[in-house]
Image (cartoon, rainbow, N blue to C red):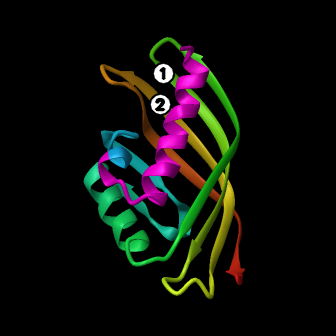
Amino acid sequence: MNDHHDIGAVLIRYATGIDRRDWELFRTVFTPDCVLDYGPIGTWHGIEEVLTFMRQSHDMAGHTLHRITNIAATVDGDSARATSYVDAVIMAPDGTSGVNAVGFYDDELVRTATGWQIRRRRFTTVRIGATNP
């Protein structure tokens, strides 16, 4: 497979890991020393902090749906940069209401022994609003 395909697969693993609450799969997306900056939502250092936040904010939710599109990646040897759009729906446990967060990710990735992983991520919010079925 080529690098652009593999980088896209990392982003899909991220979405699948969250939406399926498959935290071991989610763990494979990031380097152990990753830094995620989600602006006013928060900043986390290291995979353990990231996992703690994601579990706290998603395990109590109902269905979630993270759609990642418009992936553009630039590869330079064993490092890469990627930008992608995200449209995330996080429903309440009873499915009657939820939150829709739309924005984009700017990622720095590195090639590791197990494949591409995200070392740094910045999330830029475009819109956050309530959603009703």
Q: Secondary structure at mark 2?
A: strand
Q: Are marks 1 and 2 in contact (CB under 8 Å)?
A: yes
Residue type at the position of mark 2: Leu
Q: Which residue is at a point 66% across and 71% down the rendered structure image?
A: 100
Quadrant into which the C terminus falls: bottom right
- Give the overall secondary structure of the magenta segment: helix
Within 10 Å of the Cα at label 2, are there few (<14), some (14-19), or many (20+) other Cα atoms? many
Counting from the top left corner in percent of width and height, residue 49 is at 29, 59
Q: For residue 112, which quarter of the picture?
A: top left
For the record, the magenta segment spans 1-24
Quadrant into which the N terminus falls: top right
Res. 46 visible in picture: no
Q: Which residue is at a point 66% across and 42% down the rendered structure image?
A: 84
| Residue position for label 1 | 79
Q: Secondary structure at mark 1?
A: strand
Counting from the top left corner in percent of width and height, residue 78 is at 45, 16
Q: Is residue 113 left or right of residue 87?
A: left
